[in-house]
Image (tube, rainbow, N blue to C red):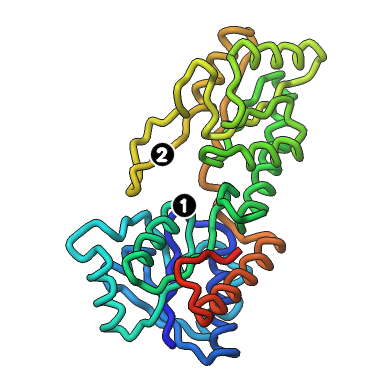
Amino acid sequence: MKIGILTSGGDCPGLNAVIRGAVLKGDRVYRSEFAGFRYGWRGVVDGDIMPLDRHSVRGLSRQGGTILGSSRTNPFEGDAGGPENIQRMMDEHGIDSIIAIGGEGTLTAARRLTDAGLKIVGVPKTIDNDLAATDYSFGFDTAVEIATEAIDRLRTTAESHQRCMVVEVMGRHVGWIALHSGMAGGAHAILIPEQPKSIEQICEWVESVRDRGRAPVIVVSEGFHLDTMEEAHSHKGLDAFNRPRLGGIGEMLAPMIEERTGIESRATVLGHMQRGGVPSAYDRVLATRLGMAAVDAVYEGRWGSMVS
């Protein structure tokens, strides 16, 4: 059997470990052949393929990013998109099935293609840790480590200048990264999407910390919104799956806090550094196990399923 592998959506520490785990398990146990689709669903639609074998995945588990590349491409769009065209491309290259490694958008597209008759197995991927049927998603542990280190560093500059530091982390509409990194970093307030708060409450917390002679550190998830806002702050438009590109809440909150409390406030957006670099030991192990499980799912014919 020849299996195609793709990585789609935002990059994430551990992607290469999934690829390595799948290829090594498939080669040693099932004698499978593998092909990689470059840049996620874009490679599937365009037929952009690279060979994958055990030599090409050597040492991959400790590398960040993805050797296949990634993109936020909707496989149902464009002249070459859609299940019929994708199946035709698979037949031309002798590919029997696909392992799709991705988050919400990727797996939703994979399920729709499976419903149309394609043979696809999904592997959950997101630093946000927001996918159902998972306890942890790989990449989350690494992202929390990176965010925690940043909070530790920002605390010293906050204390030096007696400023309020507002640290914005990723997470989309859930607060796992903010909650875990905020707790680990000893933040004075943690703002998550699941619990909207008023600006008055936030300022009360900030003033309370200042009155104790401390420099306030606030960690806010990108999906957080004040109780006066109808939805999360977004000024970057929509992605290929028509989802809002979140971000900017930290830069919105900092001047509001400074205006109301008189405490000099600064916002720091950690951004893409949370997705970069080498994966933690935990993420390497989890991702490797998921890659191996995905190959088992392929040979068991569990199309439309997600390994977890």
Q: Nearer the viewer, mark 1 or mark 2?
A: 1
Residue behind mark 1: 104
Q: Foreground: 21 or 266?
A: 21
Q: In the figure, 156 relative to 138: above or below?
A: above
The label shown at residue 245 is: 2
Side (left or right) of 89 relative to 219: left
Kindly give the residue lying farthest to the bottom in the view shown: 31
Q: In the figure, 98 relative to 261: above or below?
A: below
Residue visible at 35% across and 48% down?
241
The label shown at residue 136 is: none
Q: Foreground: 74 or 177?
A: 74
Residue visible at 45% across and 36% down?
246
The reply to whether dot 1 and dot 2 touch (C-beta < 8 Å) is no
User: In this view of the protein, can residue 91 be seen by the observer?
Assistant: yes
Residue visible at 38% across and 64% down?
40
> Where does the C terminus fall, quadrant-wise?
bottom right
Q: Residue flagged by tag 2: what amino acid is it?
A: Arg
Side (left or right) of 105 relative to 227: left
Q: Residue flagged by tag 1: what amino acid is it?
A: Glu
Q: Foreground: 42 or 155?
A: 42
How would you rate the neighbour count of disc 1 (Cα within 10 Å): few for under 14, some for 14-19, many for 20 or more?
Answer: some
Where does residue 117 sit, x and y in percent of width and height? 33, 71
Kindly give the residue lying farthest to the left in the view shown: 79
What element does badge 2 sit on?
Answer: loop
What element does badge 1 sit on?
Answer: helix
Side (left or right) of 268 relative to 245: right
Side (left or right) of 186 relative to 248: right
Q: Quadrant of residue 166?
A: top right
Where does residue 98 sit, x and y in percent of width and height? 42, 74
